[in-house]
Amino acid sequence: MTEWIALLRGVNVGGVTIRSAELREVFEGLGFSAVRTVLASGNVAFETGTSAAARLKREIERALSERFGYEAWIVLLTAERLRAVVEAFPFDAHDGGRQPYVVFASEPAAIDALLKAIGEPDPRVDPIERGDGVAYWNPVKGTTVDTPFAKVLAKPVFKTTTTNRNLRTLEKLLA
């Protein structure tokens, strides 16, 4: 069995409301085991014997779209891959004055475009580093919608291709 992590984009914001119990039902209905949701922001850990990521992703997105009536897309990665992403966080994850975030994308080119759009950010305001298929971001608490990077991330072109998670949420998914 492979342990997978599904990160849903745009859940419980902008009119797409999905309760954790309903989300769990969808995944269980697909035949997955050990289904567990974390927080109310579209985070699901599950196990399956299938290792074909592209097929799983399409199957999950189709089931979510049918059940909840929206155009679903997810980031799907193995727990092993997520663990590597979390362990590679390049900033002080325990700095209480900052918010440790990981930005995921529907495809690697979206991360490249995002980083190109921000240019050379001020590392005191927007500490950002490119990771393996992700971008790491560590803004000061309370500024996560006000920094230059936050404003670029909120642009429509990136809102439809990226999703971000707090490092602490990702750690809970792996627990």
Image (cartoon, rainbow, N blue to C red):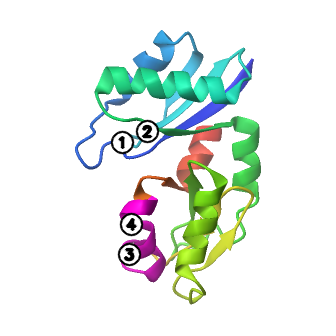
Q: Amino acid at mark 2?
A: Gly
- Span colored in magenta: 142-158
User: Which mark, residue 142?
Assistant: 3
- Position of 119 compared to 21: left or right? right
At x 38%, y 67%, the residue is: 155
Residue 11, which numbered label?
A: 1
Q: CA distance from mark 3 to mark 2?
A: 22 Å
- Rounded to the nearest angstrom, the CA distance separating label 1 from label 3 is 22 Å
**Mark in front: 1 vs 3:** 1
Q: In the rendered view, tell whether residue 141 sits above or below residue 7.
A: below
Q: Nearer the viewer, mark 3 or mark 2?
A: 2
Residue 7, above or below 128? above
Q: Nearer the viewer, residue 46 or 161?
A: 161
Residue occupied by mark 4: 154
Question: x and y percent of residue 9 in the render?
Answer: 44, 45
Which callout, 1 or 3, points at the residue further toward the start of the chain?
1
Q: Is residue 137 left or right of residue 91?
A: left
Q: List x then y, in percent, for residue 6.
A: 55, 35
The picture quadrant where one finds residue 146 is bottom left
> SS class of the residue under badge 1?
loop
Label 3 crowd bin: few (<14), some (14–19), many (20+), radius 10 Å: few
**Residue underneath mark 2:** 42
Given the image, on which type of amino acid does mark 1 rest?
Val
Amino acid, disc 4: Ala
